[in-house]
Image (tube, rainbow, N blue to C red):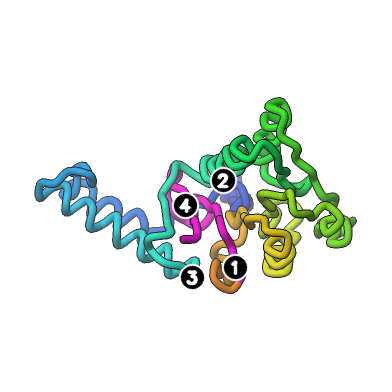
Amino acid sequence: MMGRMIYLDNNATTQMAPEVIRAISEAEPVVYGNASSMHTFGREAQKLVEEARANVAELLDCQSSEITFTSGASESNNTVFMIAKSIIDKKGSGRIVTTTIEHPSIIETVKYLRKQGIQVDQAPVSADGRVKMDELEKLMGPDVVLVSVMTGNNETGAIQPIAEISKMAHACGAMMHTDATQAIGKMQVSCKDWDLDYLSCSGHKFYGPKGVGVMYAKK
């Protein structure tokens, strides 16, 4: 007799929590308007969107107005890097600093940006998976536009000192971004305490639906 299989890949994706399934199943039959529409159906949908935005803001320790919903952390990551590219293009100079262990959505974007002539420097990590802070500091400079370091790694579990890195980034006038997808629900995440300019995450990593992500952008 075969035993029951046990799912042990929550760092890749999670099942939706029962309360999430219940909330969706209760809302979908009755709240189906376009949240951008001015009629009653649209306003009802918009109310739910704003309630969700407020809940996410509370989770991330920021303002509701700083939360934008996306299709996932990959889109959020890509958007942040494209913002940095537009700044560099406008200035005619500038660099992006990240690490060698970021999510593929960032690694692939780095490859694309380099083909576009954008300089992207990647800091190495030590044997324990933590970024080498001395090497990261050497990459800092007044020409750095964006520093992007993931909060926690999905393969090694290594957690980076984001608040410390944020201070380092701001000291040279750069924006600070972190992909916190693997950290939400496992540790306290605070956009305020970490003094972040941008943060990315995906709902499906912490028992939410797939195809729903968040981009925090400081105002």
Q: CA distance from mark 4 to mark 3?
A: 13 Å
Q: Which mark sits nearer the N-terminus, 2 or 3?
A: 3
Q: Which mark sits nearer the N-terminus, 3 or 1?
A: 3
Q: CA distance from mark 1 to mark 2?
A: 16 Å
Q: Pointer 2: what residue?
A: 80
Q: Amino acid at mark 1?
A: Asp
Task: For marks 2 and 3, give the one nearer the viewer.
Answer: 2
Residue 160 appears anywhere in the view: no
Quarter-of-image position of residue 134: bottom right
Magenta stretch bounds: 194-219
Residue 195, disc:
1
Q: Residue 212 versus residue 199: which sits nearer the camera?
A: 199
Q: Pointer 4: what residue?
A: 214
Q: Which mark sits nearer the N-terminus, 1 or 2?
A: 2
In percent of the image, x 59 and y 63: which residue is there? 196
Q: Is residue 182 left or right of residue 214?
A: right
Helix, strand or loop for disc 4 = strand
Crowding around mark 3 (Cα neighbors within 10 Å: few <14, some 14 to 19, many 20+) is some
Q: Which mark sits nearer the N-terminus, 1 or 4?
A: 1
x and y percent of residue 15 in the render?
Answer: 48, 51
Helix, strand or loop for disc 3 = loop
Spot the residue most to the left. Answer: 40
Q: Are marks 2 and 4 in contact (CB under 8 Å)?
A: no
Residue 61, disc:
3
x and y percent of residue 104 in the render?
Answer: 67, 39
x and y percent of residue 179 in the render?
Answer: 61, 53
